Amino acid sequence: MKPYKLKLKKVSSHEQALLSAIYEYLPATGVKEQVVDGIKQAINRHVGQQCNIYLEAMHQESYSEYASKIPQSTVLAVFGMTPLNKKAVCEIDPLLAIALIERLLGGNPSMNLQIRDLSDTEQGVLQYLILQILSSIYRSCGNSARVHFRFDRFASNEMGLRDLIEKDDGVAILVFRVEVGRHSGFVRLAFPDPFIEESFLNVESLSESRVDERKYELDLISRYNFIRVPIWAEVGSLTLMPAELSSIEEGDIVLLDESYVRLADGKVKGHAIIRFGDGENGGLDSELSIEKNVAHCRIDGFHK
């Protein structure tokens, strides 16, 4: 018997948190995989070659550090992210960009492509492909899109990005390896610090109704509808010593040390904490009202 050591790539908890924060740009309706598939299909349809996309690396650094590493010979596309006032930067391997452009124009690019600046016409062709990819992302997100990615412009070099982000701001860098037919190259996506935007994107505003996201969450929860757990409402609390607890008999009256309910106009009013299972991990805050012999609990938030 020989032990087998798995050689798995290690992913840090920070990288996982970073990717999770970036995913908050997309609606919470399970479209993460659909977005990548939609991008590949858009490229396949317009280029006529099989496309594969692999996430190779991700990290976080200051914008000035990122900008200093941008090579002179690269293709930089700037994307707006409505309603956020910051922009994302997409750095495309120039050889990959040239191969895609030649395919779009009906050519058959050789393996010996030379790095060069794109002409205005070639930039227009590449912009068309980018718009098709963004259109695919928009269709995948549907009416639940949290952020609308829109093509803003091409930047000639690092100098053309200086008005986008403050140099001390953080950016999240995602590095993708893209294979199209015989050609492959790297695409780097730089997002403004997603940890800053995550809390904003995660919260549903008062005037907003995320119907699709709520339906998706309910569908996920319904997968566990076969599990039975006790549910109970806590309207107060008190502390009893073991001797006191053992002497309690049926019909005894116990006064609560802390009560969440009160009598008002002859009716019981107040709030209750809805707890599940043993109730040790929080619960749901609710407004309590009594109607005849029925207690109603209107849930109005999470209890921590």
Image (spheres, rainbow, N blue to C red):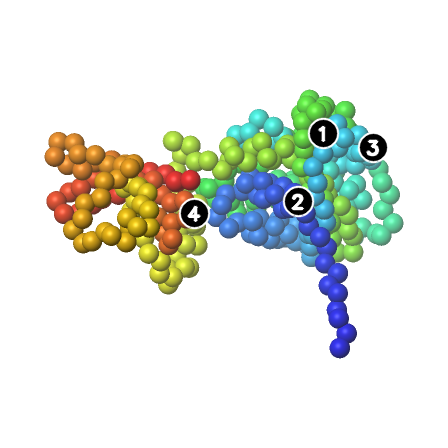
Q: Depth check: 211 or 198 in front?
A: 198
Cβ–Cβ under 8 Å for marks 4 and 3: no
Q: Earlier in the sequence, mark 1 or mark 4?
A: 1
> In this picture, is 41 found above or below 71?
below
Tag 3 residue? 72
Q: Quadrant of residue 205?
A: top left
**In the rendered structure, which amino acid carries the disc numbered 1?**
Tyr
Tag 4 residue? 281
Q: Earlier in the sequence, mark 2 or mark 1?
A: 2
**In the rendered structure, which amino acid carries the disc numbered 2?**
Glu
Q: Residues within 10 Å of mark 3 (few under 14, many from 20)?
A: few
Cβ–Cβ under 8 Å for marks 1 and 4: no
> What distance separates the C-alpha of mark 2 from that of mark 1?
18 Å
The nearer-to-camera label among 2 and 3 is 2
Residue drawn where x is 73% and y is 38% of the image: 91
The nearer-to-camera label among 1 and 4 is 4
